[in-house]
Image: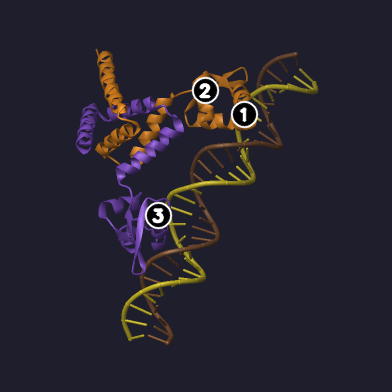
Chain colours: A purple, B orange, C yellow, D brown
Amino acid sequence: MAVLEYLWAHGEFDAKGVYSALGTTRRISHNTIQSTLERLFKKKLLARQKISHAYIYKTLVDRDELMSRMIDDVVKTISKNNTDGMLAAFVDIAARVDDAHLDRLEQLISEYRANRDIESS
Amino acid sequence: MAVLEYLWAHGEFDAKGVYSALGTTRRISHNTIQSTLERLFKKKLLARQKISHAYIYKTLVDRDELMSRMIDDVVKTISKNNTDGMLAAFVDIAARVDDAHLDRLEQLISEYRANRDIESS
DNA sequence: TAAAACACCGATTAACAGTCGGTTTATGGA
DNA sequence: TCCATAAACCGACTGTTAATCGGTGTTTTA
């Protein structure tokens, strides 16, 4: 997560760059960062491109997309096809923060619809 | 999950009861069911009560509540405090199923509000 | 009171994240 | 051209957790 956070915040970087930002604070070796980058790459969460002899990594999914995937996984394991329960959970969670979030959620739905209509015209 | 599914569908049961329902199909021993029940109990997902010398287990959370918790976990690990991103992800996921789910989501928000207002009066 | 039923503990396997060391390979400068 | 360095790559170890089961001891009950 720390690596992803960093790349989300700062764009493309090589292992060295990520290491100099995170390594000291987290007391982690360069190799640890490197392995983490490789594993994220294998999971297709990062893309990489060889510049000279070092890879430059960048994220393949943004934070919201990753969150969506993870929530999707949860929904799949726990309530196969019970999308209504899923929607109810969304409302619960939003309301749990505070009720204003329900308004905001409605607003986002409207925005989504508006956006969709523009794109399809 | 299979154990939880069973208890959600059939109410209270002891290990034996769950075993006779799931054991044969899944080719799983009585002990496996028992361990699973114990672990779920330790996680506070099940409650139990000793009847004679056997425990009767029942679920402490329903499916939607469990889903909420798991989604909450995802949101916490991936987007600390970025609730707006979370809400956007909800809309995305709902819309991804199909657009009717956006209507349904709005409906659930209304229902939630109506419910809340009744309870607070 | 002995057999059956059950709880409980420990053990094994498999997966995975986090971490790192060692080895190989490729680069670029002397 | 050759070597020092940087980086990739591979394997390993630890810790955690789920899934699975056996063994042991305890409680019922016939």
Q: Secondary structure at mark 2?
A: helix
Amino acid residing under circle 2: Leu
Q: Earlier in the sequence, mark 2 or mark 1?
A: 2
Q: A66 or D19: which is nearer to us?
A: A66
Q: A112 or B16: which is nearer to us?
A: A112
Amino acid residing under circle 1: Thr
Task: Please give left or right for residue A84 compared with residue B30 in the image.
Answer: left
Q: Which residue has dot 3 on it?
A: A41
Q: Nearer the viewer, mark 2 or mark 1?
A: 1
Residue B68 percent location from the top left of the image: 37, 30
Which residue is drawn at the image coordinates 33% and 51% (left, top)? A60
Is residue B97 depicted above or below A54 in this figure?
above
- Res A11 label: none
- Res B7 label: 2
Residue A63 appears in the figure: yes
Which residue is drawn at the image coordinates 40% and 60% (left, top)? A34
- Res B25 label: 1
Q: Nearer the viewer, mark 2 or mark 3?
A: 3
Q: Chain of mark 1?
A: B
